Image (spheres, rainbow, N blue to C red):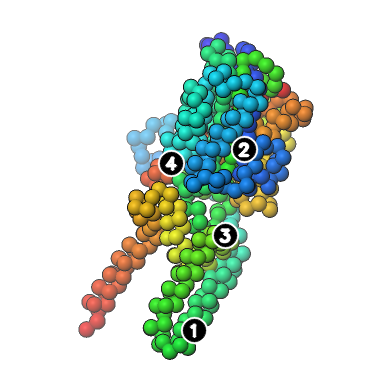
Amino acid sequence: MPAKKLGRSTVKFASPPIIVGTGTVVGPVEGKGPLASDFDVVLPDHAYGERTPEKSETKILEQAAKIAIERAKIEKSMVDYYMAGDLLNQIISAGYSARQLSIPYFGLYGACSTCAMSLALAGMVIDGGFADYVLVACSSHYQTAERQYRYPIELNIQRKTTSQYTVTGAGAAVLASSGTGPKLTHATVGKVVDLGLKDVHDMGGAMAPAAADTLLTHFADTGRGPKDYDLILTGDLASFGSEMLKELVRDNGVELGANYRDCGLMLFDTKSQHVGAGGSGCACSAVVTFGHVLKEMDKGTYKNVLLVATGALMSPLSCQQGESIPCVAHAVVIEA
Amino acid sequence: MRWTGRDVELGEERSTVASEKAKKQVSNLPHMTQASQEEKRRQLAYKELVQKRKPRPRYLRNVLVAFVVGGAIAILGQVVLEFFKSRGLDLNAASAPTLAVMILVGVVATGLGIYDELGEFAGAGAAVPITGFANTIVAAAMDFKREGWVLGMGAKMFIIAGPVIVYATLAGVAVAAIKFIASP
């Protein structure tokens, strides 16, 4: 077995990479939510001065990346790799932002799991000795996601009880081989799980089994349990998905208590803001983790956090062809 | 806690219920291996659980709101119709300008970004009247205009309304054919 690997699919970093700088940008709705004060930039509107929402998404991704580099107090030229992803076809937001940043680039697609996926890969690259600085970033945008996955933006349509609201925003972080800040200690890479659900208006329910699989694998690999973490965070299961996750892990003998929360529920006031079951999208886990959670770790509220970001890997095409929704979840451990 | 690292298990009692169903389905597929039978059973068990737990829509509220809002739009249409009739048009002649006015109302409300909010609030109450039909076309047109007038808006403005037009036309032809055959 490889020296840095634990169990089936967890890696333990020998010299844990350090998160030395972060940048977060959120949209107008997120800016009215309970975590608003934790973000670096809040947009006045979805367009952000651009002609198309796609351009606007690229702009916020680039902006988050630049803020993260600035906070890390390094030069752009010192960053070895830029790892980014988003939800759009051919991950254009990531690609176009990389065009402006001119840093050697890996494009990633993990749907809404991209945040944890990029952290895991960046950790491996740094701990493997292939880089000193890696910039990870991901973005999503309500309007671009709505256009690609659902309906035209102005269409009259009533949300289902399990429908989620795609977060407008971007989160970026610079990971370094040395420095001060929270450390990335473990990563558990998820496998694709598909329990045959086909309802595209119920992503939380579809993704919950993948989250349960990764969570249970992580606990089995590391020998830890839910009590070993101050905070267990899922990316965007929203209200219904997190309920299903709790149920699934309970069936396997693990009880998730008060230290379990979901980014999609933390980002909004789901009662007063019209966001359906909660937030979703790549940016959901990214802005909550890089904006809110790391700030709280800095204050000492949390010592160690387990982030499980889930992603649904379908496309509108595969769903129209009657395919079920394959899902994946990746987990990373961040310690203060 | 002992996690075997295989697959997420679904609770005992649920598994047995679902496995009865799965057995029936699986018996029609003798070529299936034991592993895929087990996979099928897990899928059915989960589907059952999700169906049981999924929050139900507020049917009563939705039906009432749809009735009131849809009714209000219909009353507005009636007012416009009466206006044209009062200016000397008969019922047949007045319905065409009435539809045009109602479509205009739907188009303007969509352009101002109001109609999608109404749809979220009222569901079918906003979707069924002709204002809702106008909304589907304008919403698509607004969206795809960014990809150009020809390959964007021109090609895709009927992406939601298109199927309605196609199948309404087909249904019209079918009904006309029945009438043609049935009438002496």
Q: Which numbered dot is residue A25?
A: 2
Tell me the crowding category of disc 1: few under 14, some 14 to 19, or many 20 or more residues within 10 angstroms, Cα based.
some
Q: Chain of mark 1?
A: B
Tell me the crowding category of disc 2: few under 14, some 14 to 19, or many 20 or more residues within 10 angstroms, Cα based.
many
Q: Chain of mark 4?
A: A
Determine the CA span between mark 1 and mark 2: 52 Å
Q: Say which label, 4 or 2, has the lower sequence index.
A: 2
Q: Which residue is mark 4?
A: A315
Report helix, strand or loop for mark 2.
Answer: strand
The residue drawn where x is 34% and y is 50% is B151
User: Residue type at mark 2?
Assistant: Val
- Mark 4 and 2 residues: CB-CB less than 8 Å, in contact? no
The residue drawn where x is 52% and y is 81% is B79
Q: Chain of mark 3?
A: B
Determine the CA span between mark 4 and mark 3: 26 Å
Tell me the crowding category of disc 4: few under 14, some 14 to 19, or many 20 or more residues within 10 angstroms, Cα based.
some
User: Residue type at mark 3?
Assistant: Glu
